[in-house]
Image (cartoon, grey):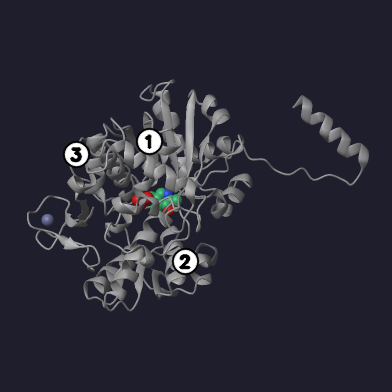
Amino acid sequence: MSYSAHFACLAGCPNVAIPLPEPIYRCPSCGGLLDVKHDIEALRERSGEAWRVLFDERMRGGQWPLGSGVWGKHEWIAPELPLDHVVSMDEGRSSLLRAEAYGSSIGLRDLRLKLCGNSHTGSFKDLGMTVLVSMVKHAIHEGQRVAAIGCASTGDTSAALAAYGAAAQIPVVVLLPRGKISTAQLVQPIAAGARVLALDTDFDGCMKIMAELAQDGVLYLANSMNALRIEGQKTVVIEICQQLGWQVPDWLVLPSGNLGNGYAMYAGFRMMKELGLVDRLPRLALAQAENANPLYRAMVAGAKTVEAVTAKPTAASAIQIGNPVSAPRALRALEAMDGVVEQASEQQLADAAARADRTGLYVCPHTAVALAATEKLRAKDIIKEDEQVVVISTANGLKFTEFKVRYHEDQLAEVDAGFANKPLELAADYATVRKAIEKMATD
Ligand SMILES: *Cc1c(COP(=O)(O)O)cnc(C)c1O
Ligand SMILES: [Zn+2]
């Protein structure tokens, strides 16, 4: 059996079929976004049941690199990429945690968190980056000249790119606005040896220069305009169905910024349904920070396109995006999955995080946006009590110590920290300590 995939135009321009190793990021015909198109007829030669069995075997088997949550599905991702060019850090296979205490506190009987932050660099960005960096390694092997892979990013994208680039020994360049990013936010790419260039501009200015560098072939582009990242990210939903015994949840809720990941959810489900692994799609809820909510505004206005806004600072820094690159992709996903868009203020996201943490979850601020949105959709009875909800937890809470510390010190902007838990300072005296503990029981 031979499977194949190529870049096609998302908007459907005819005769666009570009090999995946080509460094091309926009449709040559209309200038719009690209999409990876698979030969579905060839994949149909194996039944839905046979694919399910194969994926389950690989997930259990742990054979390198097929034990990776992404590469166990390689025929659906990059079928022509030789497995010995794969650059894997054993991504995926993250836990699907049942959040019983938190779920019941918000009126849900079955709420699960897909912990994508339990991954090599601590966010779901690993899932797409393994595909992108593997494809670059393959292209170099085929004789293409790639001096370095680049991205404009202040957080999880640069952390993932730097790690996978370092693993493959391919140079990485990260562009960011000078003086606006703390060393703590940058420590992963710095440690991995990426060349970090701090420019006298804002994030959009960095992105513009990055796009030009990619256009001129100076750097291979790793930002999410690159459709290869979607191919890896879509495995999350396949894995969720696997973990549910190939059942489909009623809802998927995720925090959204550039809107690529929302489309990845759809891309994964579309393929599973076309190939007979599942018989329906869940509903999709995309959650935005109120301070960076262009998609929410478009939905409220009933608009068919997304107008850029100026994103204001939010604790959910990875989704502080005013002009989302993948808006046309997300609109397709929302339409196909009977989707909704919800938003969360800084107060709502901080409260959701604090209450979730008190049930042991320790969520990142982006996951908190999704939880706050889930609470609001439940309160409006759009999500019903007995529906099964899976929230995509996009990063590990341990990457966001500053957010947690500032909350519990009541220092977060726009937030009244009602659940702050301050340490009690006491004299080193048995009676005083005992009294404090006894008082706890009556508080
Ligand atoms: C990148 C990122 C997002 C947003 O994903 P998009 O595809 O840009 O919508 C959400 N949460 C975290 C932690 C991220 O790193
Ligand atoms: Zn086109």
In space, the residues marked 2 and 3 are separated at their CA atoms by 39 Å
Where residue 135 sits: x, y (%)?
Answer: 31, 65
Neighbor class of circle 1 (other Cα within 10 Å; few <14, some 14-19, many 20+) is: many
* Image quadrant assignment for residue 174: bottom left
In space, the residues marked 3 and 1 are separated at their CA atoms by 23 Å
The residue to which callout 1 is attached is: 252
Q: Nearer the viewer, residue 352 or 1?
A: 1
Q: Which mark is residue 186?
A: none
Q: Is residue 4 left or right of residue 286?
A: left
Where residue 248 sits: x, y (%)?
Answer: 36, 31
Q: Residue at x 82, y 34 (%)?
A: 437
Q: Residue at x 50, y 58 (%)?
A: 121
Q: Residue at x 35, y 53 (%)?
A: 232
Vertical relation: 213 (above or below) 389: below
In space, the residues marked 2 and 1 are separated at their CA atoms by 29 Å
Whether residue 127 can be seen here: yes
* Image quadrant assignment for residue 441: top right
The residue to which callout 2 is attached is: 163
Residue at disc 3, secondary structure = loop
